[in-house]
Amino acid sequence: MRFYKLGPGAIIALHDELDLLPGKVRIKVGGGHGGHNGLKSLDAHCGKDYRRLRLGIGHPGDKDRVHSHVLGDFAKADRIWLEPLLDAISDNVELLVKGDDSKLMNKLALATGGKEEAPSPVKAAKPAGQSHIRQARNTAQPKKLPETGPMAEMLKRMFGKKDD
């Protein structure tokens, strides 16, 4: 930033987001770090007013498993959504750089088969008594559940049949 004499508005951080379902994408300017070490570092060096492309990886369901979930490899089953998402981001990076967020979000949604809408400037109110994590989990279930990997185990526990 110093060498090119850029401000925080010229920075775009692409990062994983526990509070979004796997494969979901959101874009915003500013905000807190939410415990994300990469964002903590960026905040310390350049402030908080930079753009963030938040890539959902889902929450493992248990606070004690967050560290290994974030730092571990993706399961092979995650390729269903991960590869099309990463390809779409690289194919449309020009839109990201230009700041054409609505068009970028539409392109990403089309590429991944999602029904994403353009980001709204007004934040929707979350239902009373529901955490942001629970709200994100309850919005939609993936169309095809992965059969193996840490995310598959979590999804099976959350949505699988309960033995009585």
Image (cartoon, rainbow, N blue to C red):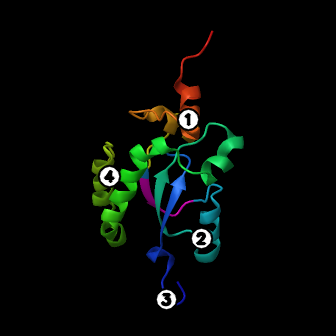
x and y, in percent, of residue 58 in the image: 53, 43
Please name the amino acid that badge 1 sits on: Arg
Residue shown at 33%/43% (left/top)? 114
Query: What residue range appears in magenta?
Result: 26-31
Discs 1, 4 touching: Cβ within 8 Å? no
Q: Earlier in the sequence, mark 1 or mark 2?
A: 2
Q: Is residue 79 magenta?
A: no
Task: Judge whether 152 appears above or below 75 on screen.
Answer: above
Residue that appears at 47% across and 54% down: 55
Q: Residue furthest right?
A: 64
Which residue is under mark 1? Answer: 134
Q: Amino acid at mark 3?
A: Lys
Q: Secondary structure at mark 2?
A: helix
Labels 2 and 4: the sequence-earlier one: 2
- Secondary structure state at the residue bearing disc 3: loop
Q: Which mark is residue 5?
A: 3
Residue sitting at 55 percent across and 28 percent down? 156
Give the residue displayed 40% in from the left and 57% down from the top. 86
Q: Which residue is mark 4?
A: 118
Amino acid type for the residue under numbered disc 2:
Leu
Q: Main secondary structure of the magenta part?
A: strand
| Count of marks overlaid on the render | 4
The CA distance from mark 3 to mark 2 is 16 Å
Distance between the alpha carbons at the discs numbered 1 and 2: 28 Å
Whichever of labels 1 and 4 marks the residue nearer the N terminus, that label is: 4
Please give the residue where the numbered disc 2 appears in the rendered image: 42
